[in-house]
Image (cartoon, helix red, strand yellow):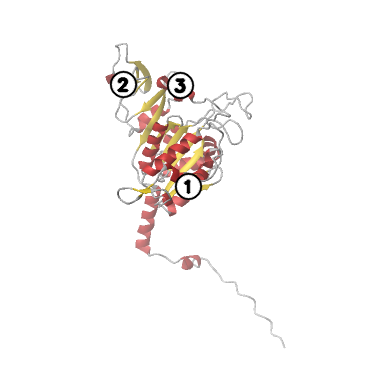
C-alpha cells in the first residue's frame, strides 16, 4: 500500500491523485493546457481500480510527451512518432497491462501518422490521447499538420498553404473502434471521455483541444470560453437530440447535410432534431466533417464506438491454436533447421 493510502471497505488500498503524481518538476510553460489534462488523468486513475504497477504511459516527442515523467507509474518517453509501435510490442507481450499513449498533433500526425493509423485499424486495447494545439510547441512555433490554412508561423511566414488534418475524421477513416473529442478547459467532460475510452475494449482515440498559450494562444477559445462556448460547442450524447445554445438551437439532417434549426420561433421543435447514435459509423462521419465551420457548432463527445476483437486477443488465440496443433516448439531446433551448415576448422598440418 503506498504511503498515506487508506484502505477501502474491501481492504484494498484507496489511491488518490497524489499517489499518481511523480516527484519530478513539471516543465511545461505556465498556463499551458497540458496541466489541466495531467490533473484530469491523475484524478481519474484512482477511480479505475487498476493496480498502479499495471499502468504504463508511453509517449513520443513533443511538449505533451513529457507526460510519463509526471506520472508515478511505469512509462517510457520514446522516439518521435513511434509511441504506437512501442505500445504495440508491449501490449502484445503483456496484454494484461493498462497502456496509455500520449502524443501531440505533430508527433502523431506528421512523422507518426503511419504508426497511428495502423494501431487504430489493428484495434490494440490502448487509450490514445492526442493533445492538439495546432502548432509545434516544443520546437518553438512552427505550423503543424493540424494548423489552419494561412497560418503565419516561423516556418510559414507568408501563411501555411497546407490543408490541415481533421484528427477525428482520420481516426474514423482508419476504422478506429472508439473515437472522441474533448477540450482541456472542460475538465468534467474530459474526464468522462477518458473514462469512456478506458472502459472501451479496443483502440480508443481521444482528440483533446489543448491551448498553447505561448505560440498559439486562443486557437480554441470559441469552443471553450464562457461567452462563446454555448453557441459554438455541440455535445454529442448517445440517444439524445442534438441541441446547443442552452436549448435554443438544434441540428437536423437535410439529406446528408447537417443544418442548424431555431427551436424558439415555433417552426421547429425538439422532435425535429437529429437523435445521435454513437454506434452509427455513417452518422459519425457526417459529424466529423463539421470541422471549424462558422455556420455550424463544433462537435465534442463520443463520435463512434463499436465492439471488435482486439489485436492482442487475436494474436494470443492464434498462438494457442498453433501450439495446440504443433506443440510448443523448440527454438534451438528452429534455428538449426532448413539450409544450415557447419564450418569446420582446417586440419592442422602434420609436423615432424
Which quarter shows the C terminus? bottom right
Front residue (pair 156, 256): 156
> Which numbered disc flags the more N-terminal residue, 2 or 3?
2
10 Å crowding of disc 1: few (<14), some (14-19), many (20+): many
Q: Label 2 belongs to which residue? A: 273
Identify the mark at residue 293; answer none if there is no mark.
Answer: 3
Q: Tell whether 262 sits left or right of 41.
A: left
Q: Label 1 belongs to which residue? A: 72
Q: Tell me residue 17's x, y (percent).
A: 43, 42
10 Å crowding of disc 2: few (<14), some (14-19), many (20+): many
Front residue (pair 51, 11): 11
Front residue (pair 275, 345): 275
Q: Secondary structure at mark 2?
A: loop
Inspect this view and state whether residue 174 appears.
no
Front residue (pair 8, 295): 8
Q: Secondary structure at mark 1?
A: loop
Q: Tell me residue 248's x, y (percent).
A: 34, 17
> Which numbered disc flags the more N-terminal residue, 1 or 3?
1
Q: Residue furthest left?
A: 271
> Which numbered disc flags the more N-terminal residue, 2 or 1?
1
When asked about the image quadrant of residue 189, the answer is top left
What is the CA distance from the residue labelled 2 to the residue labelled 3?
19 Å
Q: Tell me residue 275's x, y (percent).
A: 30, 26
Amino acid at each position: 500500500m503506498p504511503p498515506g493510502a487508506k484502505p477501502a471497505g474491501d481492504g484494498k488500498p484507496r489511491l488518490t491523485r497524489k499517489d499518481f503524481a511523480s516527484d519530478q518538476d513539471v516543465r511545461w510553460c505556465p498556463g499551458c493546457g497540458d496541466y489541466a489534462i495531467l490533473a484530469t488523468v491523475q484524478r481519474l486513475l484512482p477511480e479505475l481500480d487498476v493496480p498502479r504497477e499495471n499502468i504504463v504511459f508511453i509517449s513520443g516527442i513533443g511538449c505533451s510527451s513529457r507526460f510519463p515523467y509526471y506520472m508515478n507509474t511505469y512509462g517510457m518517453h520514446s522516439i518521435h512518432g513511434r509511441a504506437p509501435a512501442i505500445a504495440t510490442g508491449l501490449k502484445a507481450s503483456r496484454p494484461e497491462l493498462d497502456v496509455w499513449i500520449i502524443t501531440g498533433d505533430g508527433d502523431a500526425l506528421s512523422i507518426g501518422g503511419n504508426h497511428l493509423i495502423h494501431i487504430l485499424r489493428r484495434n490494440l486495447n490502448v487509450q490514445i490521447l492526442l493533445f492538439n494545439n495546432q502548432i509545434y510547441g516544443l520546437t518553438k512555433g512552427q505550423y503543424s499538420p493540424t494548423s489552419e490554412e494561412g497560418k503565419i508561423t516561423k516556418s510559414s511566414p507568408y501563411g501555411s498553404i497546407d490543408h490541415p488534418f481533421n484528427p477525428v475524421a482520420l481516426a474514423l477513416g482508419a476504422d478506429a473502434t472508439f473515437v472522441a473529442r474533448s477540450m482541456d478547459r472542460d475538465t468534467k467532460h474530459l474526464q468522462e471521455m477518458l473514462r469512456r475510452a478506458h472502459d472501451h475494449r479496443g483502440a480508443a482515440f481521444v482528440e483533446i483541444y489543448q491551448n498553447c498559450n505561448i505560440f498559439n494562444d486562443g486557437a480554441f477559445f470559441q469552443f471553450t470560453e464562457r461567452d462563446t462556448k454555448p453557441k459554438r460547442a455541440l455535445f454529442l450524447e448517445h440517444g439524445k437530440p442534438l441541441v446547443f445554445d442552452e436549448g435554443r438551437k438544434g441540428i437536423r439532417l437535410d439529406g446528408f447535410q447537417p443544418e442548424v434549426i431555431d427551436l424558439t420561433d415555433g417552426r421547429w421543435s425538439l422532435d425535429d432534431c437529429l437523435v445521435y447514435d454513437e454506434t452509427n459509423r455513417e452518422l459519425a462521419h457526417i459529424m466529423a466533417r463539421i470541422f471549424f465551420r462558422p455556420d455550424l457548432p463544433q462537435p465534442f463527445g463520443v463520435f463512434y464506438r463499436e465492439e471488435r476483437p482486439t489485436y492482442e486477443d487475436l494474436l494470443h488465440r492464434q498462438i494457442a491454436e498453433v501450439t495446440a496443433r504443433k506443440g510448443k516448439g523448440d527454438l534451438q531446433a528452429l534455428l538449426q533447421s532448413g539450409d544450415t551448415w557447419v564450418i569446420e576448422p582446417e586440419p592442422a598440418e602434420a609436423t615432424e
